[in-house]
Amino acid sequence: EGPHGFGCPIGTLVTTRMLPIVVLVLVHFASKGEIDISFLPSFEATKFLGGVLASSVLCPSCATDVTVLVWCTVGLVSWFMFQVVLERLLPCALVEGAPLPDGSGKKLTYRINGHLAFWVTLLLLEVAWPSIITLPEGEEKVVFGRAPLTLLYDYYAELALCTIGLSFLLSFYLYFTSFAQSKLLAKGGNTGYATYDFFMGRELNPRSLNNTFDWKEFCELRPGLMGWMILNLAMMQKQYDNLGYVTGSMILINIFQGVYVWDALYQEKAILTTMDITTDGFGFMLVFGDLAWVPFTYSLQSRYLVDYDPHLSLPALLLILITNMAGYTIFRSANSQKDAFRRNPADKAVSHLQYLQTKRGTRLLTSGWWGMARKINYTGDWIMGLSWCMVCGRDSIVPYYYAIYFCILLVHRSVRDDMMCHEKYGDDWLEYKRLVPYRFIPGII
């Protein structure tokens, strides 16, 4: 007996080692505009490490100027700490999360101010970046203006590498501190298999600063998610510098993904009832996903467009816009409906919905959006992701990695969720699946 998810302990070990390589390779593909494996080093045991260190893809700047990596690390830590300061100092709403799974009935309190931090971040990057200029008289003066975002394009690969390193450091910190007394451990991350628990996360809700700073909720939405949007803005600025204008595809990808990020932060309290917060431990899987995978693979479309824009026609752009709006409508409407029902089933906006009363005392929606399919929100999410890829045209499969990867991710997550819900609800879950037989698309699948 042992853990079975994610390929067991060996699978999680392989995944932990492979994910950083996948990110760096995808960054390379986006810069080349195609799948290019000419960078692969020799796999002879005596030469492999040297080949990796000398590779401009797997270890950018390692063989040329290591100080670049130092400065990138300083910048990333400063960005992280800046977001921490905003979380600490900006006005916030104190919102209780779901009851903890230890049966105590206790609820953790979260500081909800991500939406305000979003706008403060954009404002400061636009008008408050300090720089020193030399006046005609020879006197130096500090002035404030727009941040030099194109540096993020110039050092895109190096920033990805340093973020990966920092993700490992944070993951090790969280793993070792989880062995302290009185820690609430996640069921899936407390197996006794070190590689598996490191990946899944032992502690359910790691906290610091007198138990008021929640690492998982913070990392889920702040540095990585906003960093993704800032990277997109940097790519748009770089395209403007290169061409003298911004293309329709670049405008759409910034709008689509910018709205997606804004929506997540505007609806920040909605994540408090998601599986990531209520069930999963905070280990390498979520740390790496939040801080490295999201900003540096979700921004690949904008990175690709800097150098390989397809210059799509207006009708094509309009079709893509309609596709995105359809996906967003399904995604946001379904999630809002479920969140509203969870918080107050008597609310007039959701009180008419039918549901299955379970023996556990909870209610499973069987009408509205959730009567159409059990994971209808995943369908809307994927349609949005497909539209992000479509803005890159049909010249390369590289930008479409997201639609492919996200489809696999959502199918895997839905299967995992189905198993957990069956364990949680027993026969009630089988009855729920009878009432709502389709998983993603009503009448099809």
Image (tube, grey):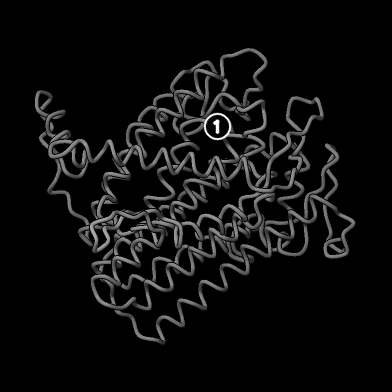
- Quarter that holds the C terminus: bottom right
Vertical relation: 266 (above or below) 293: below
The residue positioned farthest toward the top in the image shown: 181
On screen, residue 215 versus residue 392, left or right, reads right
Place residue 396 in its image quadrant.
Answer: bottom left
On screen, residue 358 versus residue 100, left or right, reads right
- The foreground one among 433 and 44 is 44
Where is residue 69 shown, x and y percent of the image? 26, 38
Vertical relation: 73 (above or below) 393: above
Amino acid bearing label 1:
Phe
Q: Secondary structure at mark 1?
A: loop
On screen, residue 221 versus residue 366, left or right, reads left
- The foreground one among 277 and 60 is 60
Crowding at dot 1, Cα within 10 Å, few <14 / some 14-19 / many 20+, comes out as many
Where is residue 269 shown, x and y percent of the image? 69, 49
- The foreground one among 392 and 168 is 168
Question: Can residue 169 be seen in the rendering of this structure?
Answer: yes
Q: Tell me which residue sits at (12%, 34%) in the image.
A: 51
The residue positioned farthest toward the front in the image shown: 137
Place residue 19 in its image quadrant.
Answer: top left
Where is residue 146 shown, x and y percent of the image? 40, 62
Question: Can residue 19 be seen in the rendering of this structure?
Answer: no
For disc 1, the marked residue is 282
